[in-house]
Image (cartoon, rainbow, N blue to C red):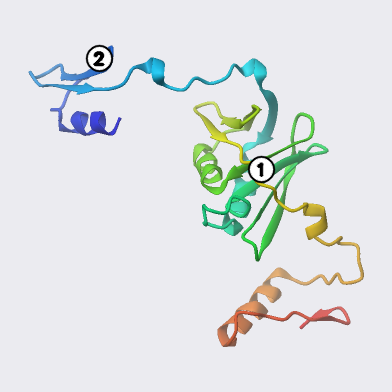
Amino acid sequence: ARDILERVKMMPDGPVRVKANGTDVVVASLSKARKYKLSGLSAIDFPQRQADLEAEIRTIECDDLSYLIRCATKVASSDVTRASVNSVLLQLRSGKWSACATDGHRMVVATATGDGDGPDTAMVISKKSAEAVYGLIRPGTQRVLVKLFPTYVSFGTENATLTCSMLDAQLPPIERCIPATDGDMVVKAKKDEICDALKAILTTARHDTTVLDMISGKIE
């Protein structure tokens, strides 16, 4: 495909004809006598997708999927040798989609605001696949169709479909990693105030560790 692109760029202005003949591809200019012939492979050798009848169908709002992937990929590790931290867990529970990712030191759990369709399910895909799904979504897309097969999953919009393998990585149970929010150690504060305080600490900190104390309804 890259070779064809380079040949087309070199063509003179005007219509261009691309013709496939078996394993050969011929790129020719219709306005001038210029023609390139490239050798390819047989289309029969290209991997075939499984029939959609074998897939489990789910849907998710476009904005929700974009939000979940943005949150998860910011935390997921870039170490491709460790699948459990170089991955994103997407799951549908009780009609709500959520995403989880960790790099071994931090963990993020994000929940979509919209409702999802279909029974509960969960899938783990690589960080790179999640980023590719994010690039697939265009502004104005309403819903993304999610098709789950035994070993891979596809994300489809009106214009394109991306298929990626599901990983066999095991992420820790989310419910055990995130404390319940109805305990005694809950302090509410304004977002701007927390950001300003953390920026001030990071400016003068000599170590990579920051201690947060929650005392008498305040964060210190």
**Direction left: furthest residue:** 33
195 sits left or right of 118 in the view: left
Residue 75 position within the rendered picture, expressed as x and y whole percent measured from the top left: 60, 59
Instruction: Rate crowding at label 2 as few (under 14), some (14 to 19) or many (20 or more) other CA atoms within 10 Å.
Output: few
**Residue corresponding to mark 1:** 64
The amino acid marked with disc number 2 is Lys
Instruction: Rate crowding at label 1 as few (under 14), some (14 to 19) or many (20 or more) other CA atoms within 10 Å.
Output: many
**Direction top: furthest residue:** 21
The amino acid marked with disc number 1 is Asp
Q: How many marks can you see?
A: 2
> Disc 2 versus disc 1: distance between alpha carbons?
41 Å
Is residue 58 or residue 49 the one in the foreground? 49
Residue under the image location 72 percent in, 81 percent down: 211
Which image quadrant: the C terminus?
Answer: bottom right
Residue 64 position within the rendered picture, expressed as x and y whole percent measured from the top left: 66, 43
Write down the quadrant of residue 190 in the picture: bottom right
Is residue 30 or residue 154 the one in the foreground? 154
Residue 74 position within the rendered picture, expressed as x and y whole percent measured from the top left: 58, 57
Foreground mark, 2 or 1? 2
Residue under the image location 66 percent in, 18 percent down: 54
Please tell me whether residue 215 is drawn above or below residue 130 in the rendered image: below
Please tell me whether residue 72 is drawn above or below residue 165 in the rendered image: below
- Could you tell me which secondary element the residue under label 2 belongs to? strand
Question: Mark 1 or mark 2, which is nearer the start of the sequence?
Answer: 2
Which image quadrant: the N terminus?
Answer: top left
Residue under the image location 15 percent in, 32 percent down: 10
171 sits left or right of 5 in the view: right
Marks 1 and 2: in contact by CB < 8 Å? no
Is residue 115 or residue 108 the one in the foreground? 108
Residue under the image location 57 percent in, 52 percent down: 86
Residue 19 is labelled as 2
Residue 147 position within the rendered picture, expressed as x and y whole percent measured from the top left: 64, 27
